[in-house]
C-alpha cells in the first residue's frame, strides 16, 4: 500500500451551517463535485475535505452516530509565518468557530493554538520552523 491520505470527511450536524463556516468563513474553495444538500467537497491543496451529515457517515461506517467528548483526532492547518497563526484562529472564531486554546509558544519550538469548528472538530493552527513549505505549497517533512 502506498502511504496516502486523499480525503478527510467530517460528520456534521447541519450541512449548510458547516458549508458556510468552511466556504464563507474560512474561504475554503468548494469543489463542483459537491451535491447540494448531500455532501460538500473542498479543495485544500493536496488532501480534500468533505462534509457529510454525521448520522449518514456513522451509518456508512457501521457506527453509532452518538459521540461526545474528544474523538482522538485533530486536524491541522500549518502556516508559513508565526504571525499567521493568530490571524487564522481569529478568522475561524469570527466565522462561528470556538477558541479551544489561544496561540502560544509551543514546547517543540513552534507557535500554535486550537479552534473547534461549529460541530466541535478540533483544528490546530501551527507555525513550525522545522517543516518548511515547498514552492507548490505542500508541507515538507524531514525524510
Image: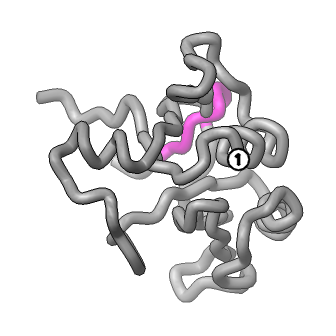
Return the residue nearer the eye: 47 or 100.
100
> Residue 68: which quarter of the image?
bottom left
| Rendered view: 71 above or below 105 | above
Residue located 66% across and 61% down the image:
118
Residue 100 can be seen, yes or no: yes
> Residue 32: which quarter of the image?
top right
Image coordinates of residue 5 in percent, x first then y, are 34, 36
Part of the protein shown in magenta: 134-140
61 with respect to 49 (left or right): left
Name, please, the residue furthest toward the top. 32
Image coordinates of residue 113 in percent, x first then y, are 67, 76
Q: Coloring scheme of the render?
A: one colour
Helix, strand or loop status at disc 1: helix
Crowding at dot 1, Cα within 10 Å, few <14 / some 14-19 / many 20+, comes out as some
Residue located 46% across and 64% down the image:
74
Return the residue nearer the eye: 25 or 18.
18
15 with respect to 93 (left or right): left
Image coordinates of residue 80 in percent, x first then y, are 73, 52
Name the residue tied to disc 1. Answer: 17
Residue 129 can be seen, yes or no: no
Return the residue nearer the eye: 70 or 13.
13
Is 95 within the magenta? no
| Rendered view: 123 above or below 63 | below
Amino acid at each position: 500500500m502506498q502511504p496516502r491520505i486523499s480525503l478527510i470527511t467530517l460528520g456534521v450536524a447541519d450541512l449548510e451551517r458547516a458549508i458556510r463556516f468552511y466556504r464563507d468563513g474560512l474561504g475554503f474553495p468548494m469543489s463542483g463535485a459537491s451535491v447540494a444538500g448531500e455532501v460538500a467537497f473542498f479543495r485544500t491543496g493536496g488532501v480534500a475535505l468533505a462534509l457529510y451529515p454525521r448520522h449518514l457517515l456513522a451509518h456508512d461506517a457501521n457506527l453509532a452516530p452518538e459521540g461526545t467528548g474528544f474523538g482522538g483526532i485533530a486536524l491541522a492547518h500549518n502556516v508559513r509565518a508565526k504571525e499567521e497563526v493568530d490571524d487564522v484562529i481569529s478568522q475561524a472564531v469570527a466565522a462561528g468557530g470556538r477558541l479551544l486554546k489561544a496561540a502560544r509558544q509551543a514546547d517543540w519550538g513552534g507557535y500554535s493554538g486550537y479552534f473547534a469548528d461549529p460541530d466541535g472538530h478540533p483544528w490546530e493552527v501551527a507555525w513550525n520552523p522545522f517543516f518548511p513549505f515547498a514552492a507548490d505549497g505542500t508541507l515538507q517533512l524531514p525524510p
